[in-house]
Amino acid sequence: MASHLSAALGSIAHLEPDIDYRVNGNTIDLYFSQLVSFYFGQDAFALRGEAFDDMLWVVLGWLDAVQFITLHSTLQHRTGSLSADLSHEPSPVLPNESWYGTVWIPAFAHRARVFWELASAGWDTTLCRGGMGWNPRLEPYKNAITNELFIAASINMYLHFPGDANPAPFSASSGIQPPLPGSSLPEMQEWPARDVRYLVAAIEGYEWLTTSGMVNDQGLYTDGFHISGSGNPSSNNTQCDQRNDMVYTYNQGVLLTGQLGLFQVTGMSSYIDDGHDLVRSVIAATGWDLDAQRPIDDLTELLPGQLPPWRGLGRAGVLEDVCDVVGDCSQDSQTFKGIYMHHLTTFCAPLALAPGVEPAGLSDDALQKAQRAHLLTCRAYTHWLRHNARAALGTRDAGGRYGMWWTAGLLSMTTTTTTTAALGNMPNQGAVPSGANATDYRTHGVPVNSEWMSEATQTRHTEAAGRIRGRWSSSCIRLGP
């Protein structure tokens, strides 16, 4: 939530300067107050016991909030420096004062730092020669999202973390603070900005992910790897050898933020090139011809109620998750396409290559050349983005609420008109390809089996489910006629 709200606020902050600053400012203040409310409403204590990806979402969210505060204070109050292209006239109200939101930077940065340290305990070299594990309470599983989040969060900590002198949740009279439980980090008196350990973590994480074998034949990131025999005490296997071929939209997006940040620091064009390769793979997997700037399938030839073929991550040039077509997406799955678009927007933002840290080894001319090439490549995605935006707009109901299956807006269909029989008669309409080792645990929950859970965890899960069913049955009896 913090990431999406901060991004929306950033868009408002970039509105043309001839818009009444009071209208613009009031809108920003209204939604920023909700961001502050979310800071206090977020159950930070409970999140410390969640999976490592849950912790890393916290890091990215509050770093995004810090970036927005810095941006808005710079644009409207001239308290910092940014590209000359962003120069606005000072606000006529308190022109020499910084925006009040800057007082929240220490709190937001502190939460990001605490959760980065907690999450860093997930990095493990005993299995698969590296990589972040997903959930320490389940069988070992090294998945794309946790590793992509670790890369993006780490490089953003290096770029945007302003430092932290707050030792909470610990306090020591000596002034030396212990590392957080479970982490391998040294004792610290304070946490400086531009700490090289964040950069090292991002680079090592990226090297591991890109050599892990997690990418499929379409150039898309599958969900992750199990380690065969991990629950067998007699097994000595330590390799990631059982791939979950499930593909989600958000697994193709979060990495883009990490790739952008790594380029901003190192100046290595391979990071940006890899990002564009991934974007092009996603677009192709929606059934869009990037050269012809149209869907690869002729939509005019479709029969009533017929869907275009599934192309790997969508159809008819529109982004989809597998669960969209049958309408059984979980609350998690419903956010995935938005997450993808958020990180693509970050990657292709007009100032994406105007870094806060000068890329190593790049002259001003070389940086400007890289900027022009990057933005030119990003512009090639515009028609595809508009196509998806039109599809999404077509899903709105009378109250202006958007639907989750964007393709329905393009084809004027619903999950009720797309019958099970129709899906069954058409190949690859959205189901996982036959024979693929793919488990959609984000939609249907983690399977209760030895691949995902230890015997003890399976037993606890089964007993807990039985208690819930028992309470539900009792409630139905009491509420019955």
Image: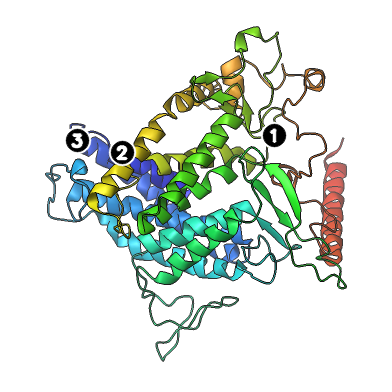
Query: In the figure, residue 106 lies in which quadrant?
Result: bottom left
Q: Are marks 2 and 3 in contact (CB under 8 Å)?
A: no
Q: How far apart are marks 1 and 3 (CA)?
A: 42 Å
Q: Can residue 2 be seen in this view?
A: no
Q: Which amino acid does label 1 sit on?
A: Cys
Above or below, 273 against 168 in this view is above
Nearer to us: label 2 or label 1: 2
* Farthest residue, direction bottom: 174
Left or right: residue 408 compared with residue 85 = right
Q: Position of residue 340 (x, y in %)?
A: 52, 40
Nearer to us: label 2 or label 3: 2
Left or right: residue 26 compared with residue 54 = left
Q: What residue type is labelled 3?
A: Pro
Secondary structure at numbered mark 3: loop
Mark 1 or 3, nearer chain start: 3
Residue at numbered disc 3: 17
Q: Position of residue 71 (x, y in %)?
A: 28, 50
Residue at numbered disc 1: 323
Q: What's the residue at 45%, 71% (across, down)?
A: 197
Q: Position of residue 6 (x, y in %)?
A: 39, 47
Q: What's the residue at 51%, 66% (across, down)?
A: 115
Q: Which amino acid does label 2 sit on?
A: Arg
Residue at numbered disc 2: 372
Above or below, 426 against 168 in this view is above
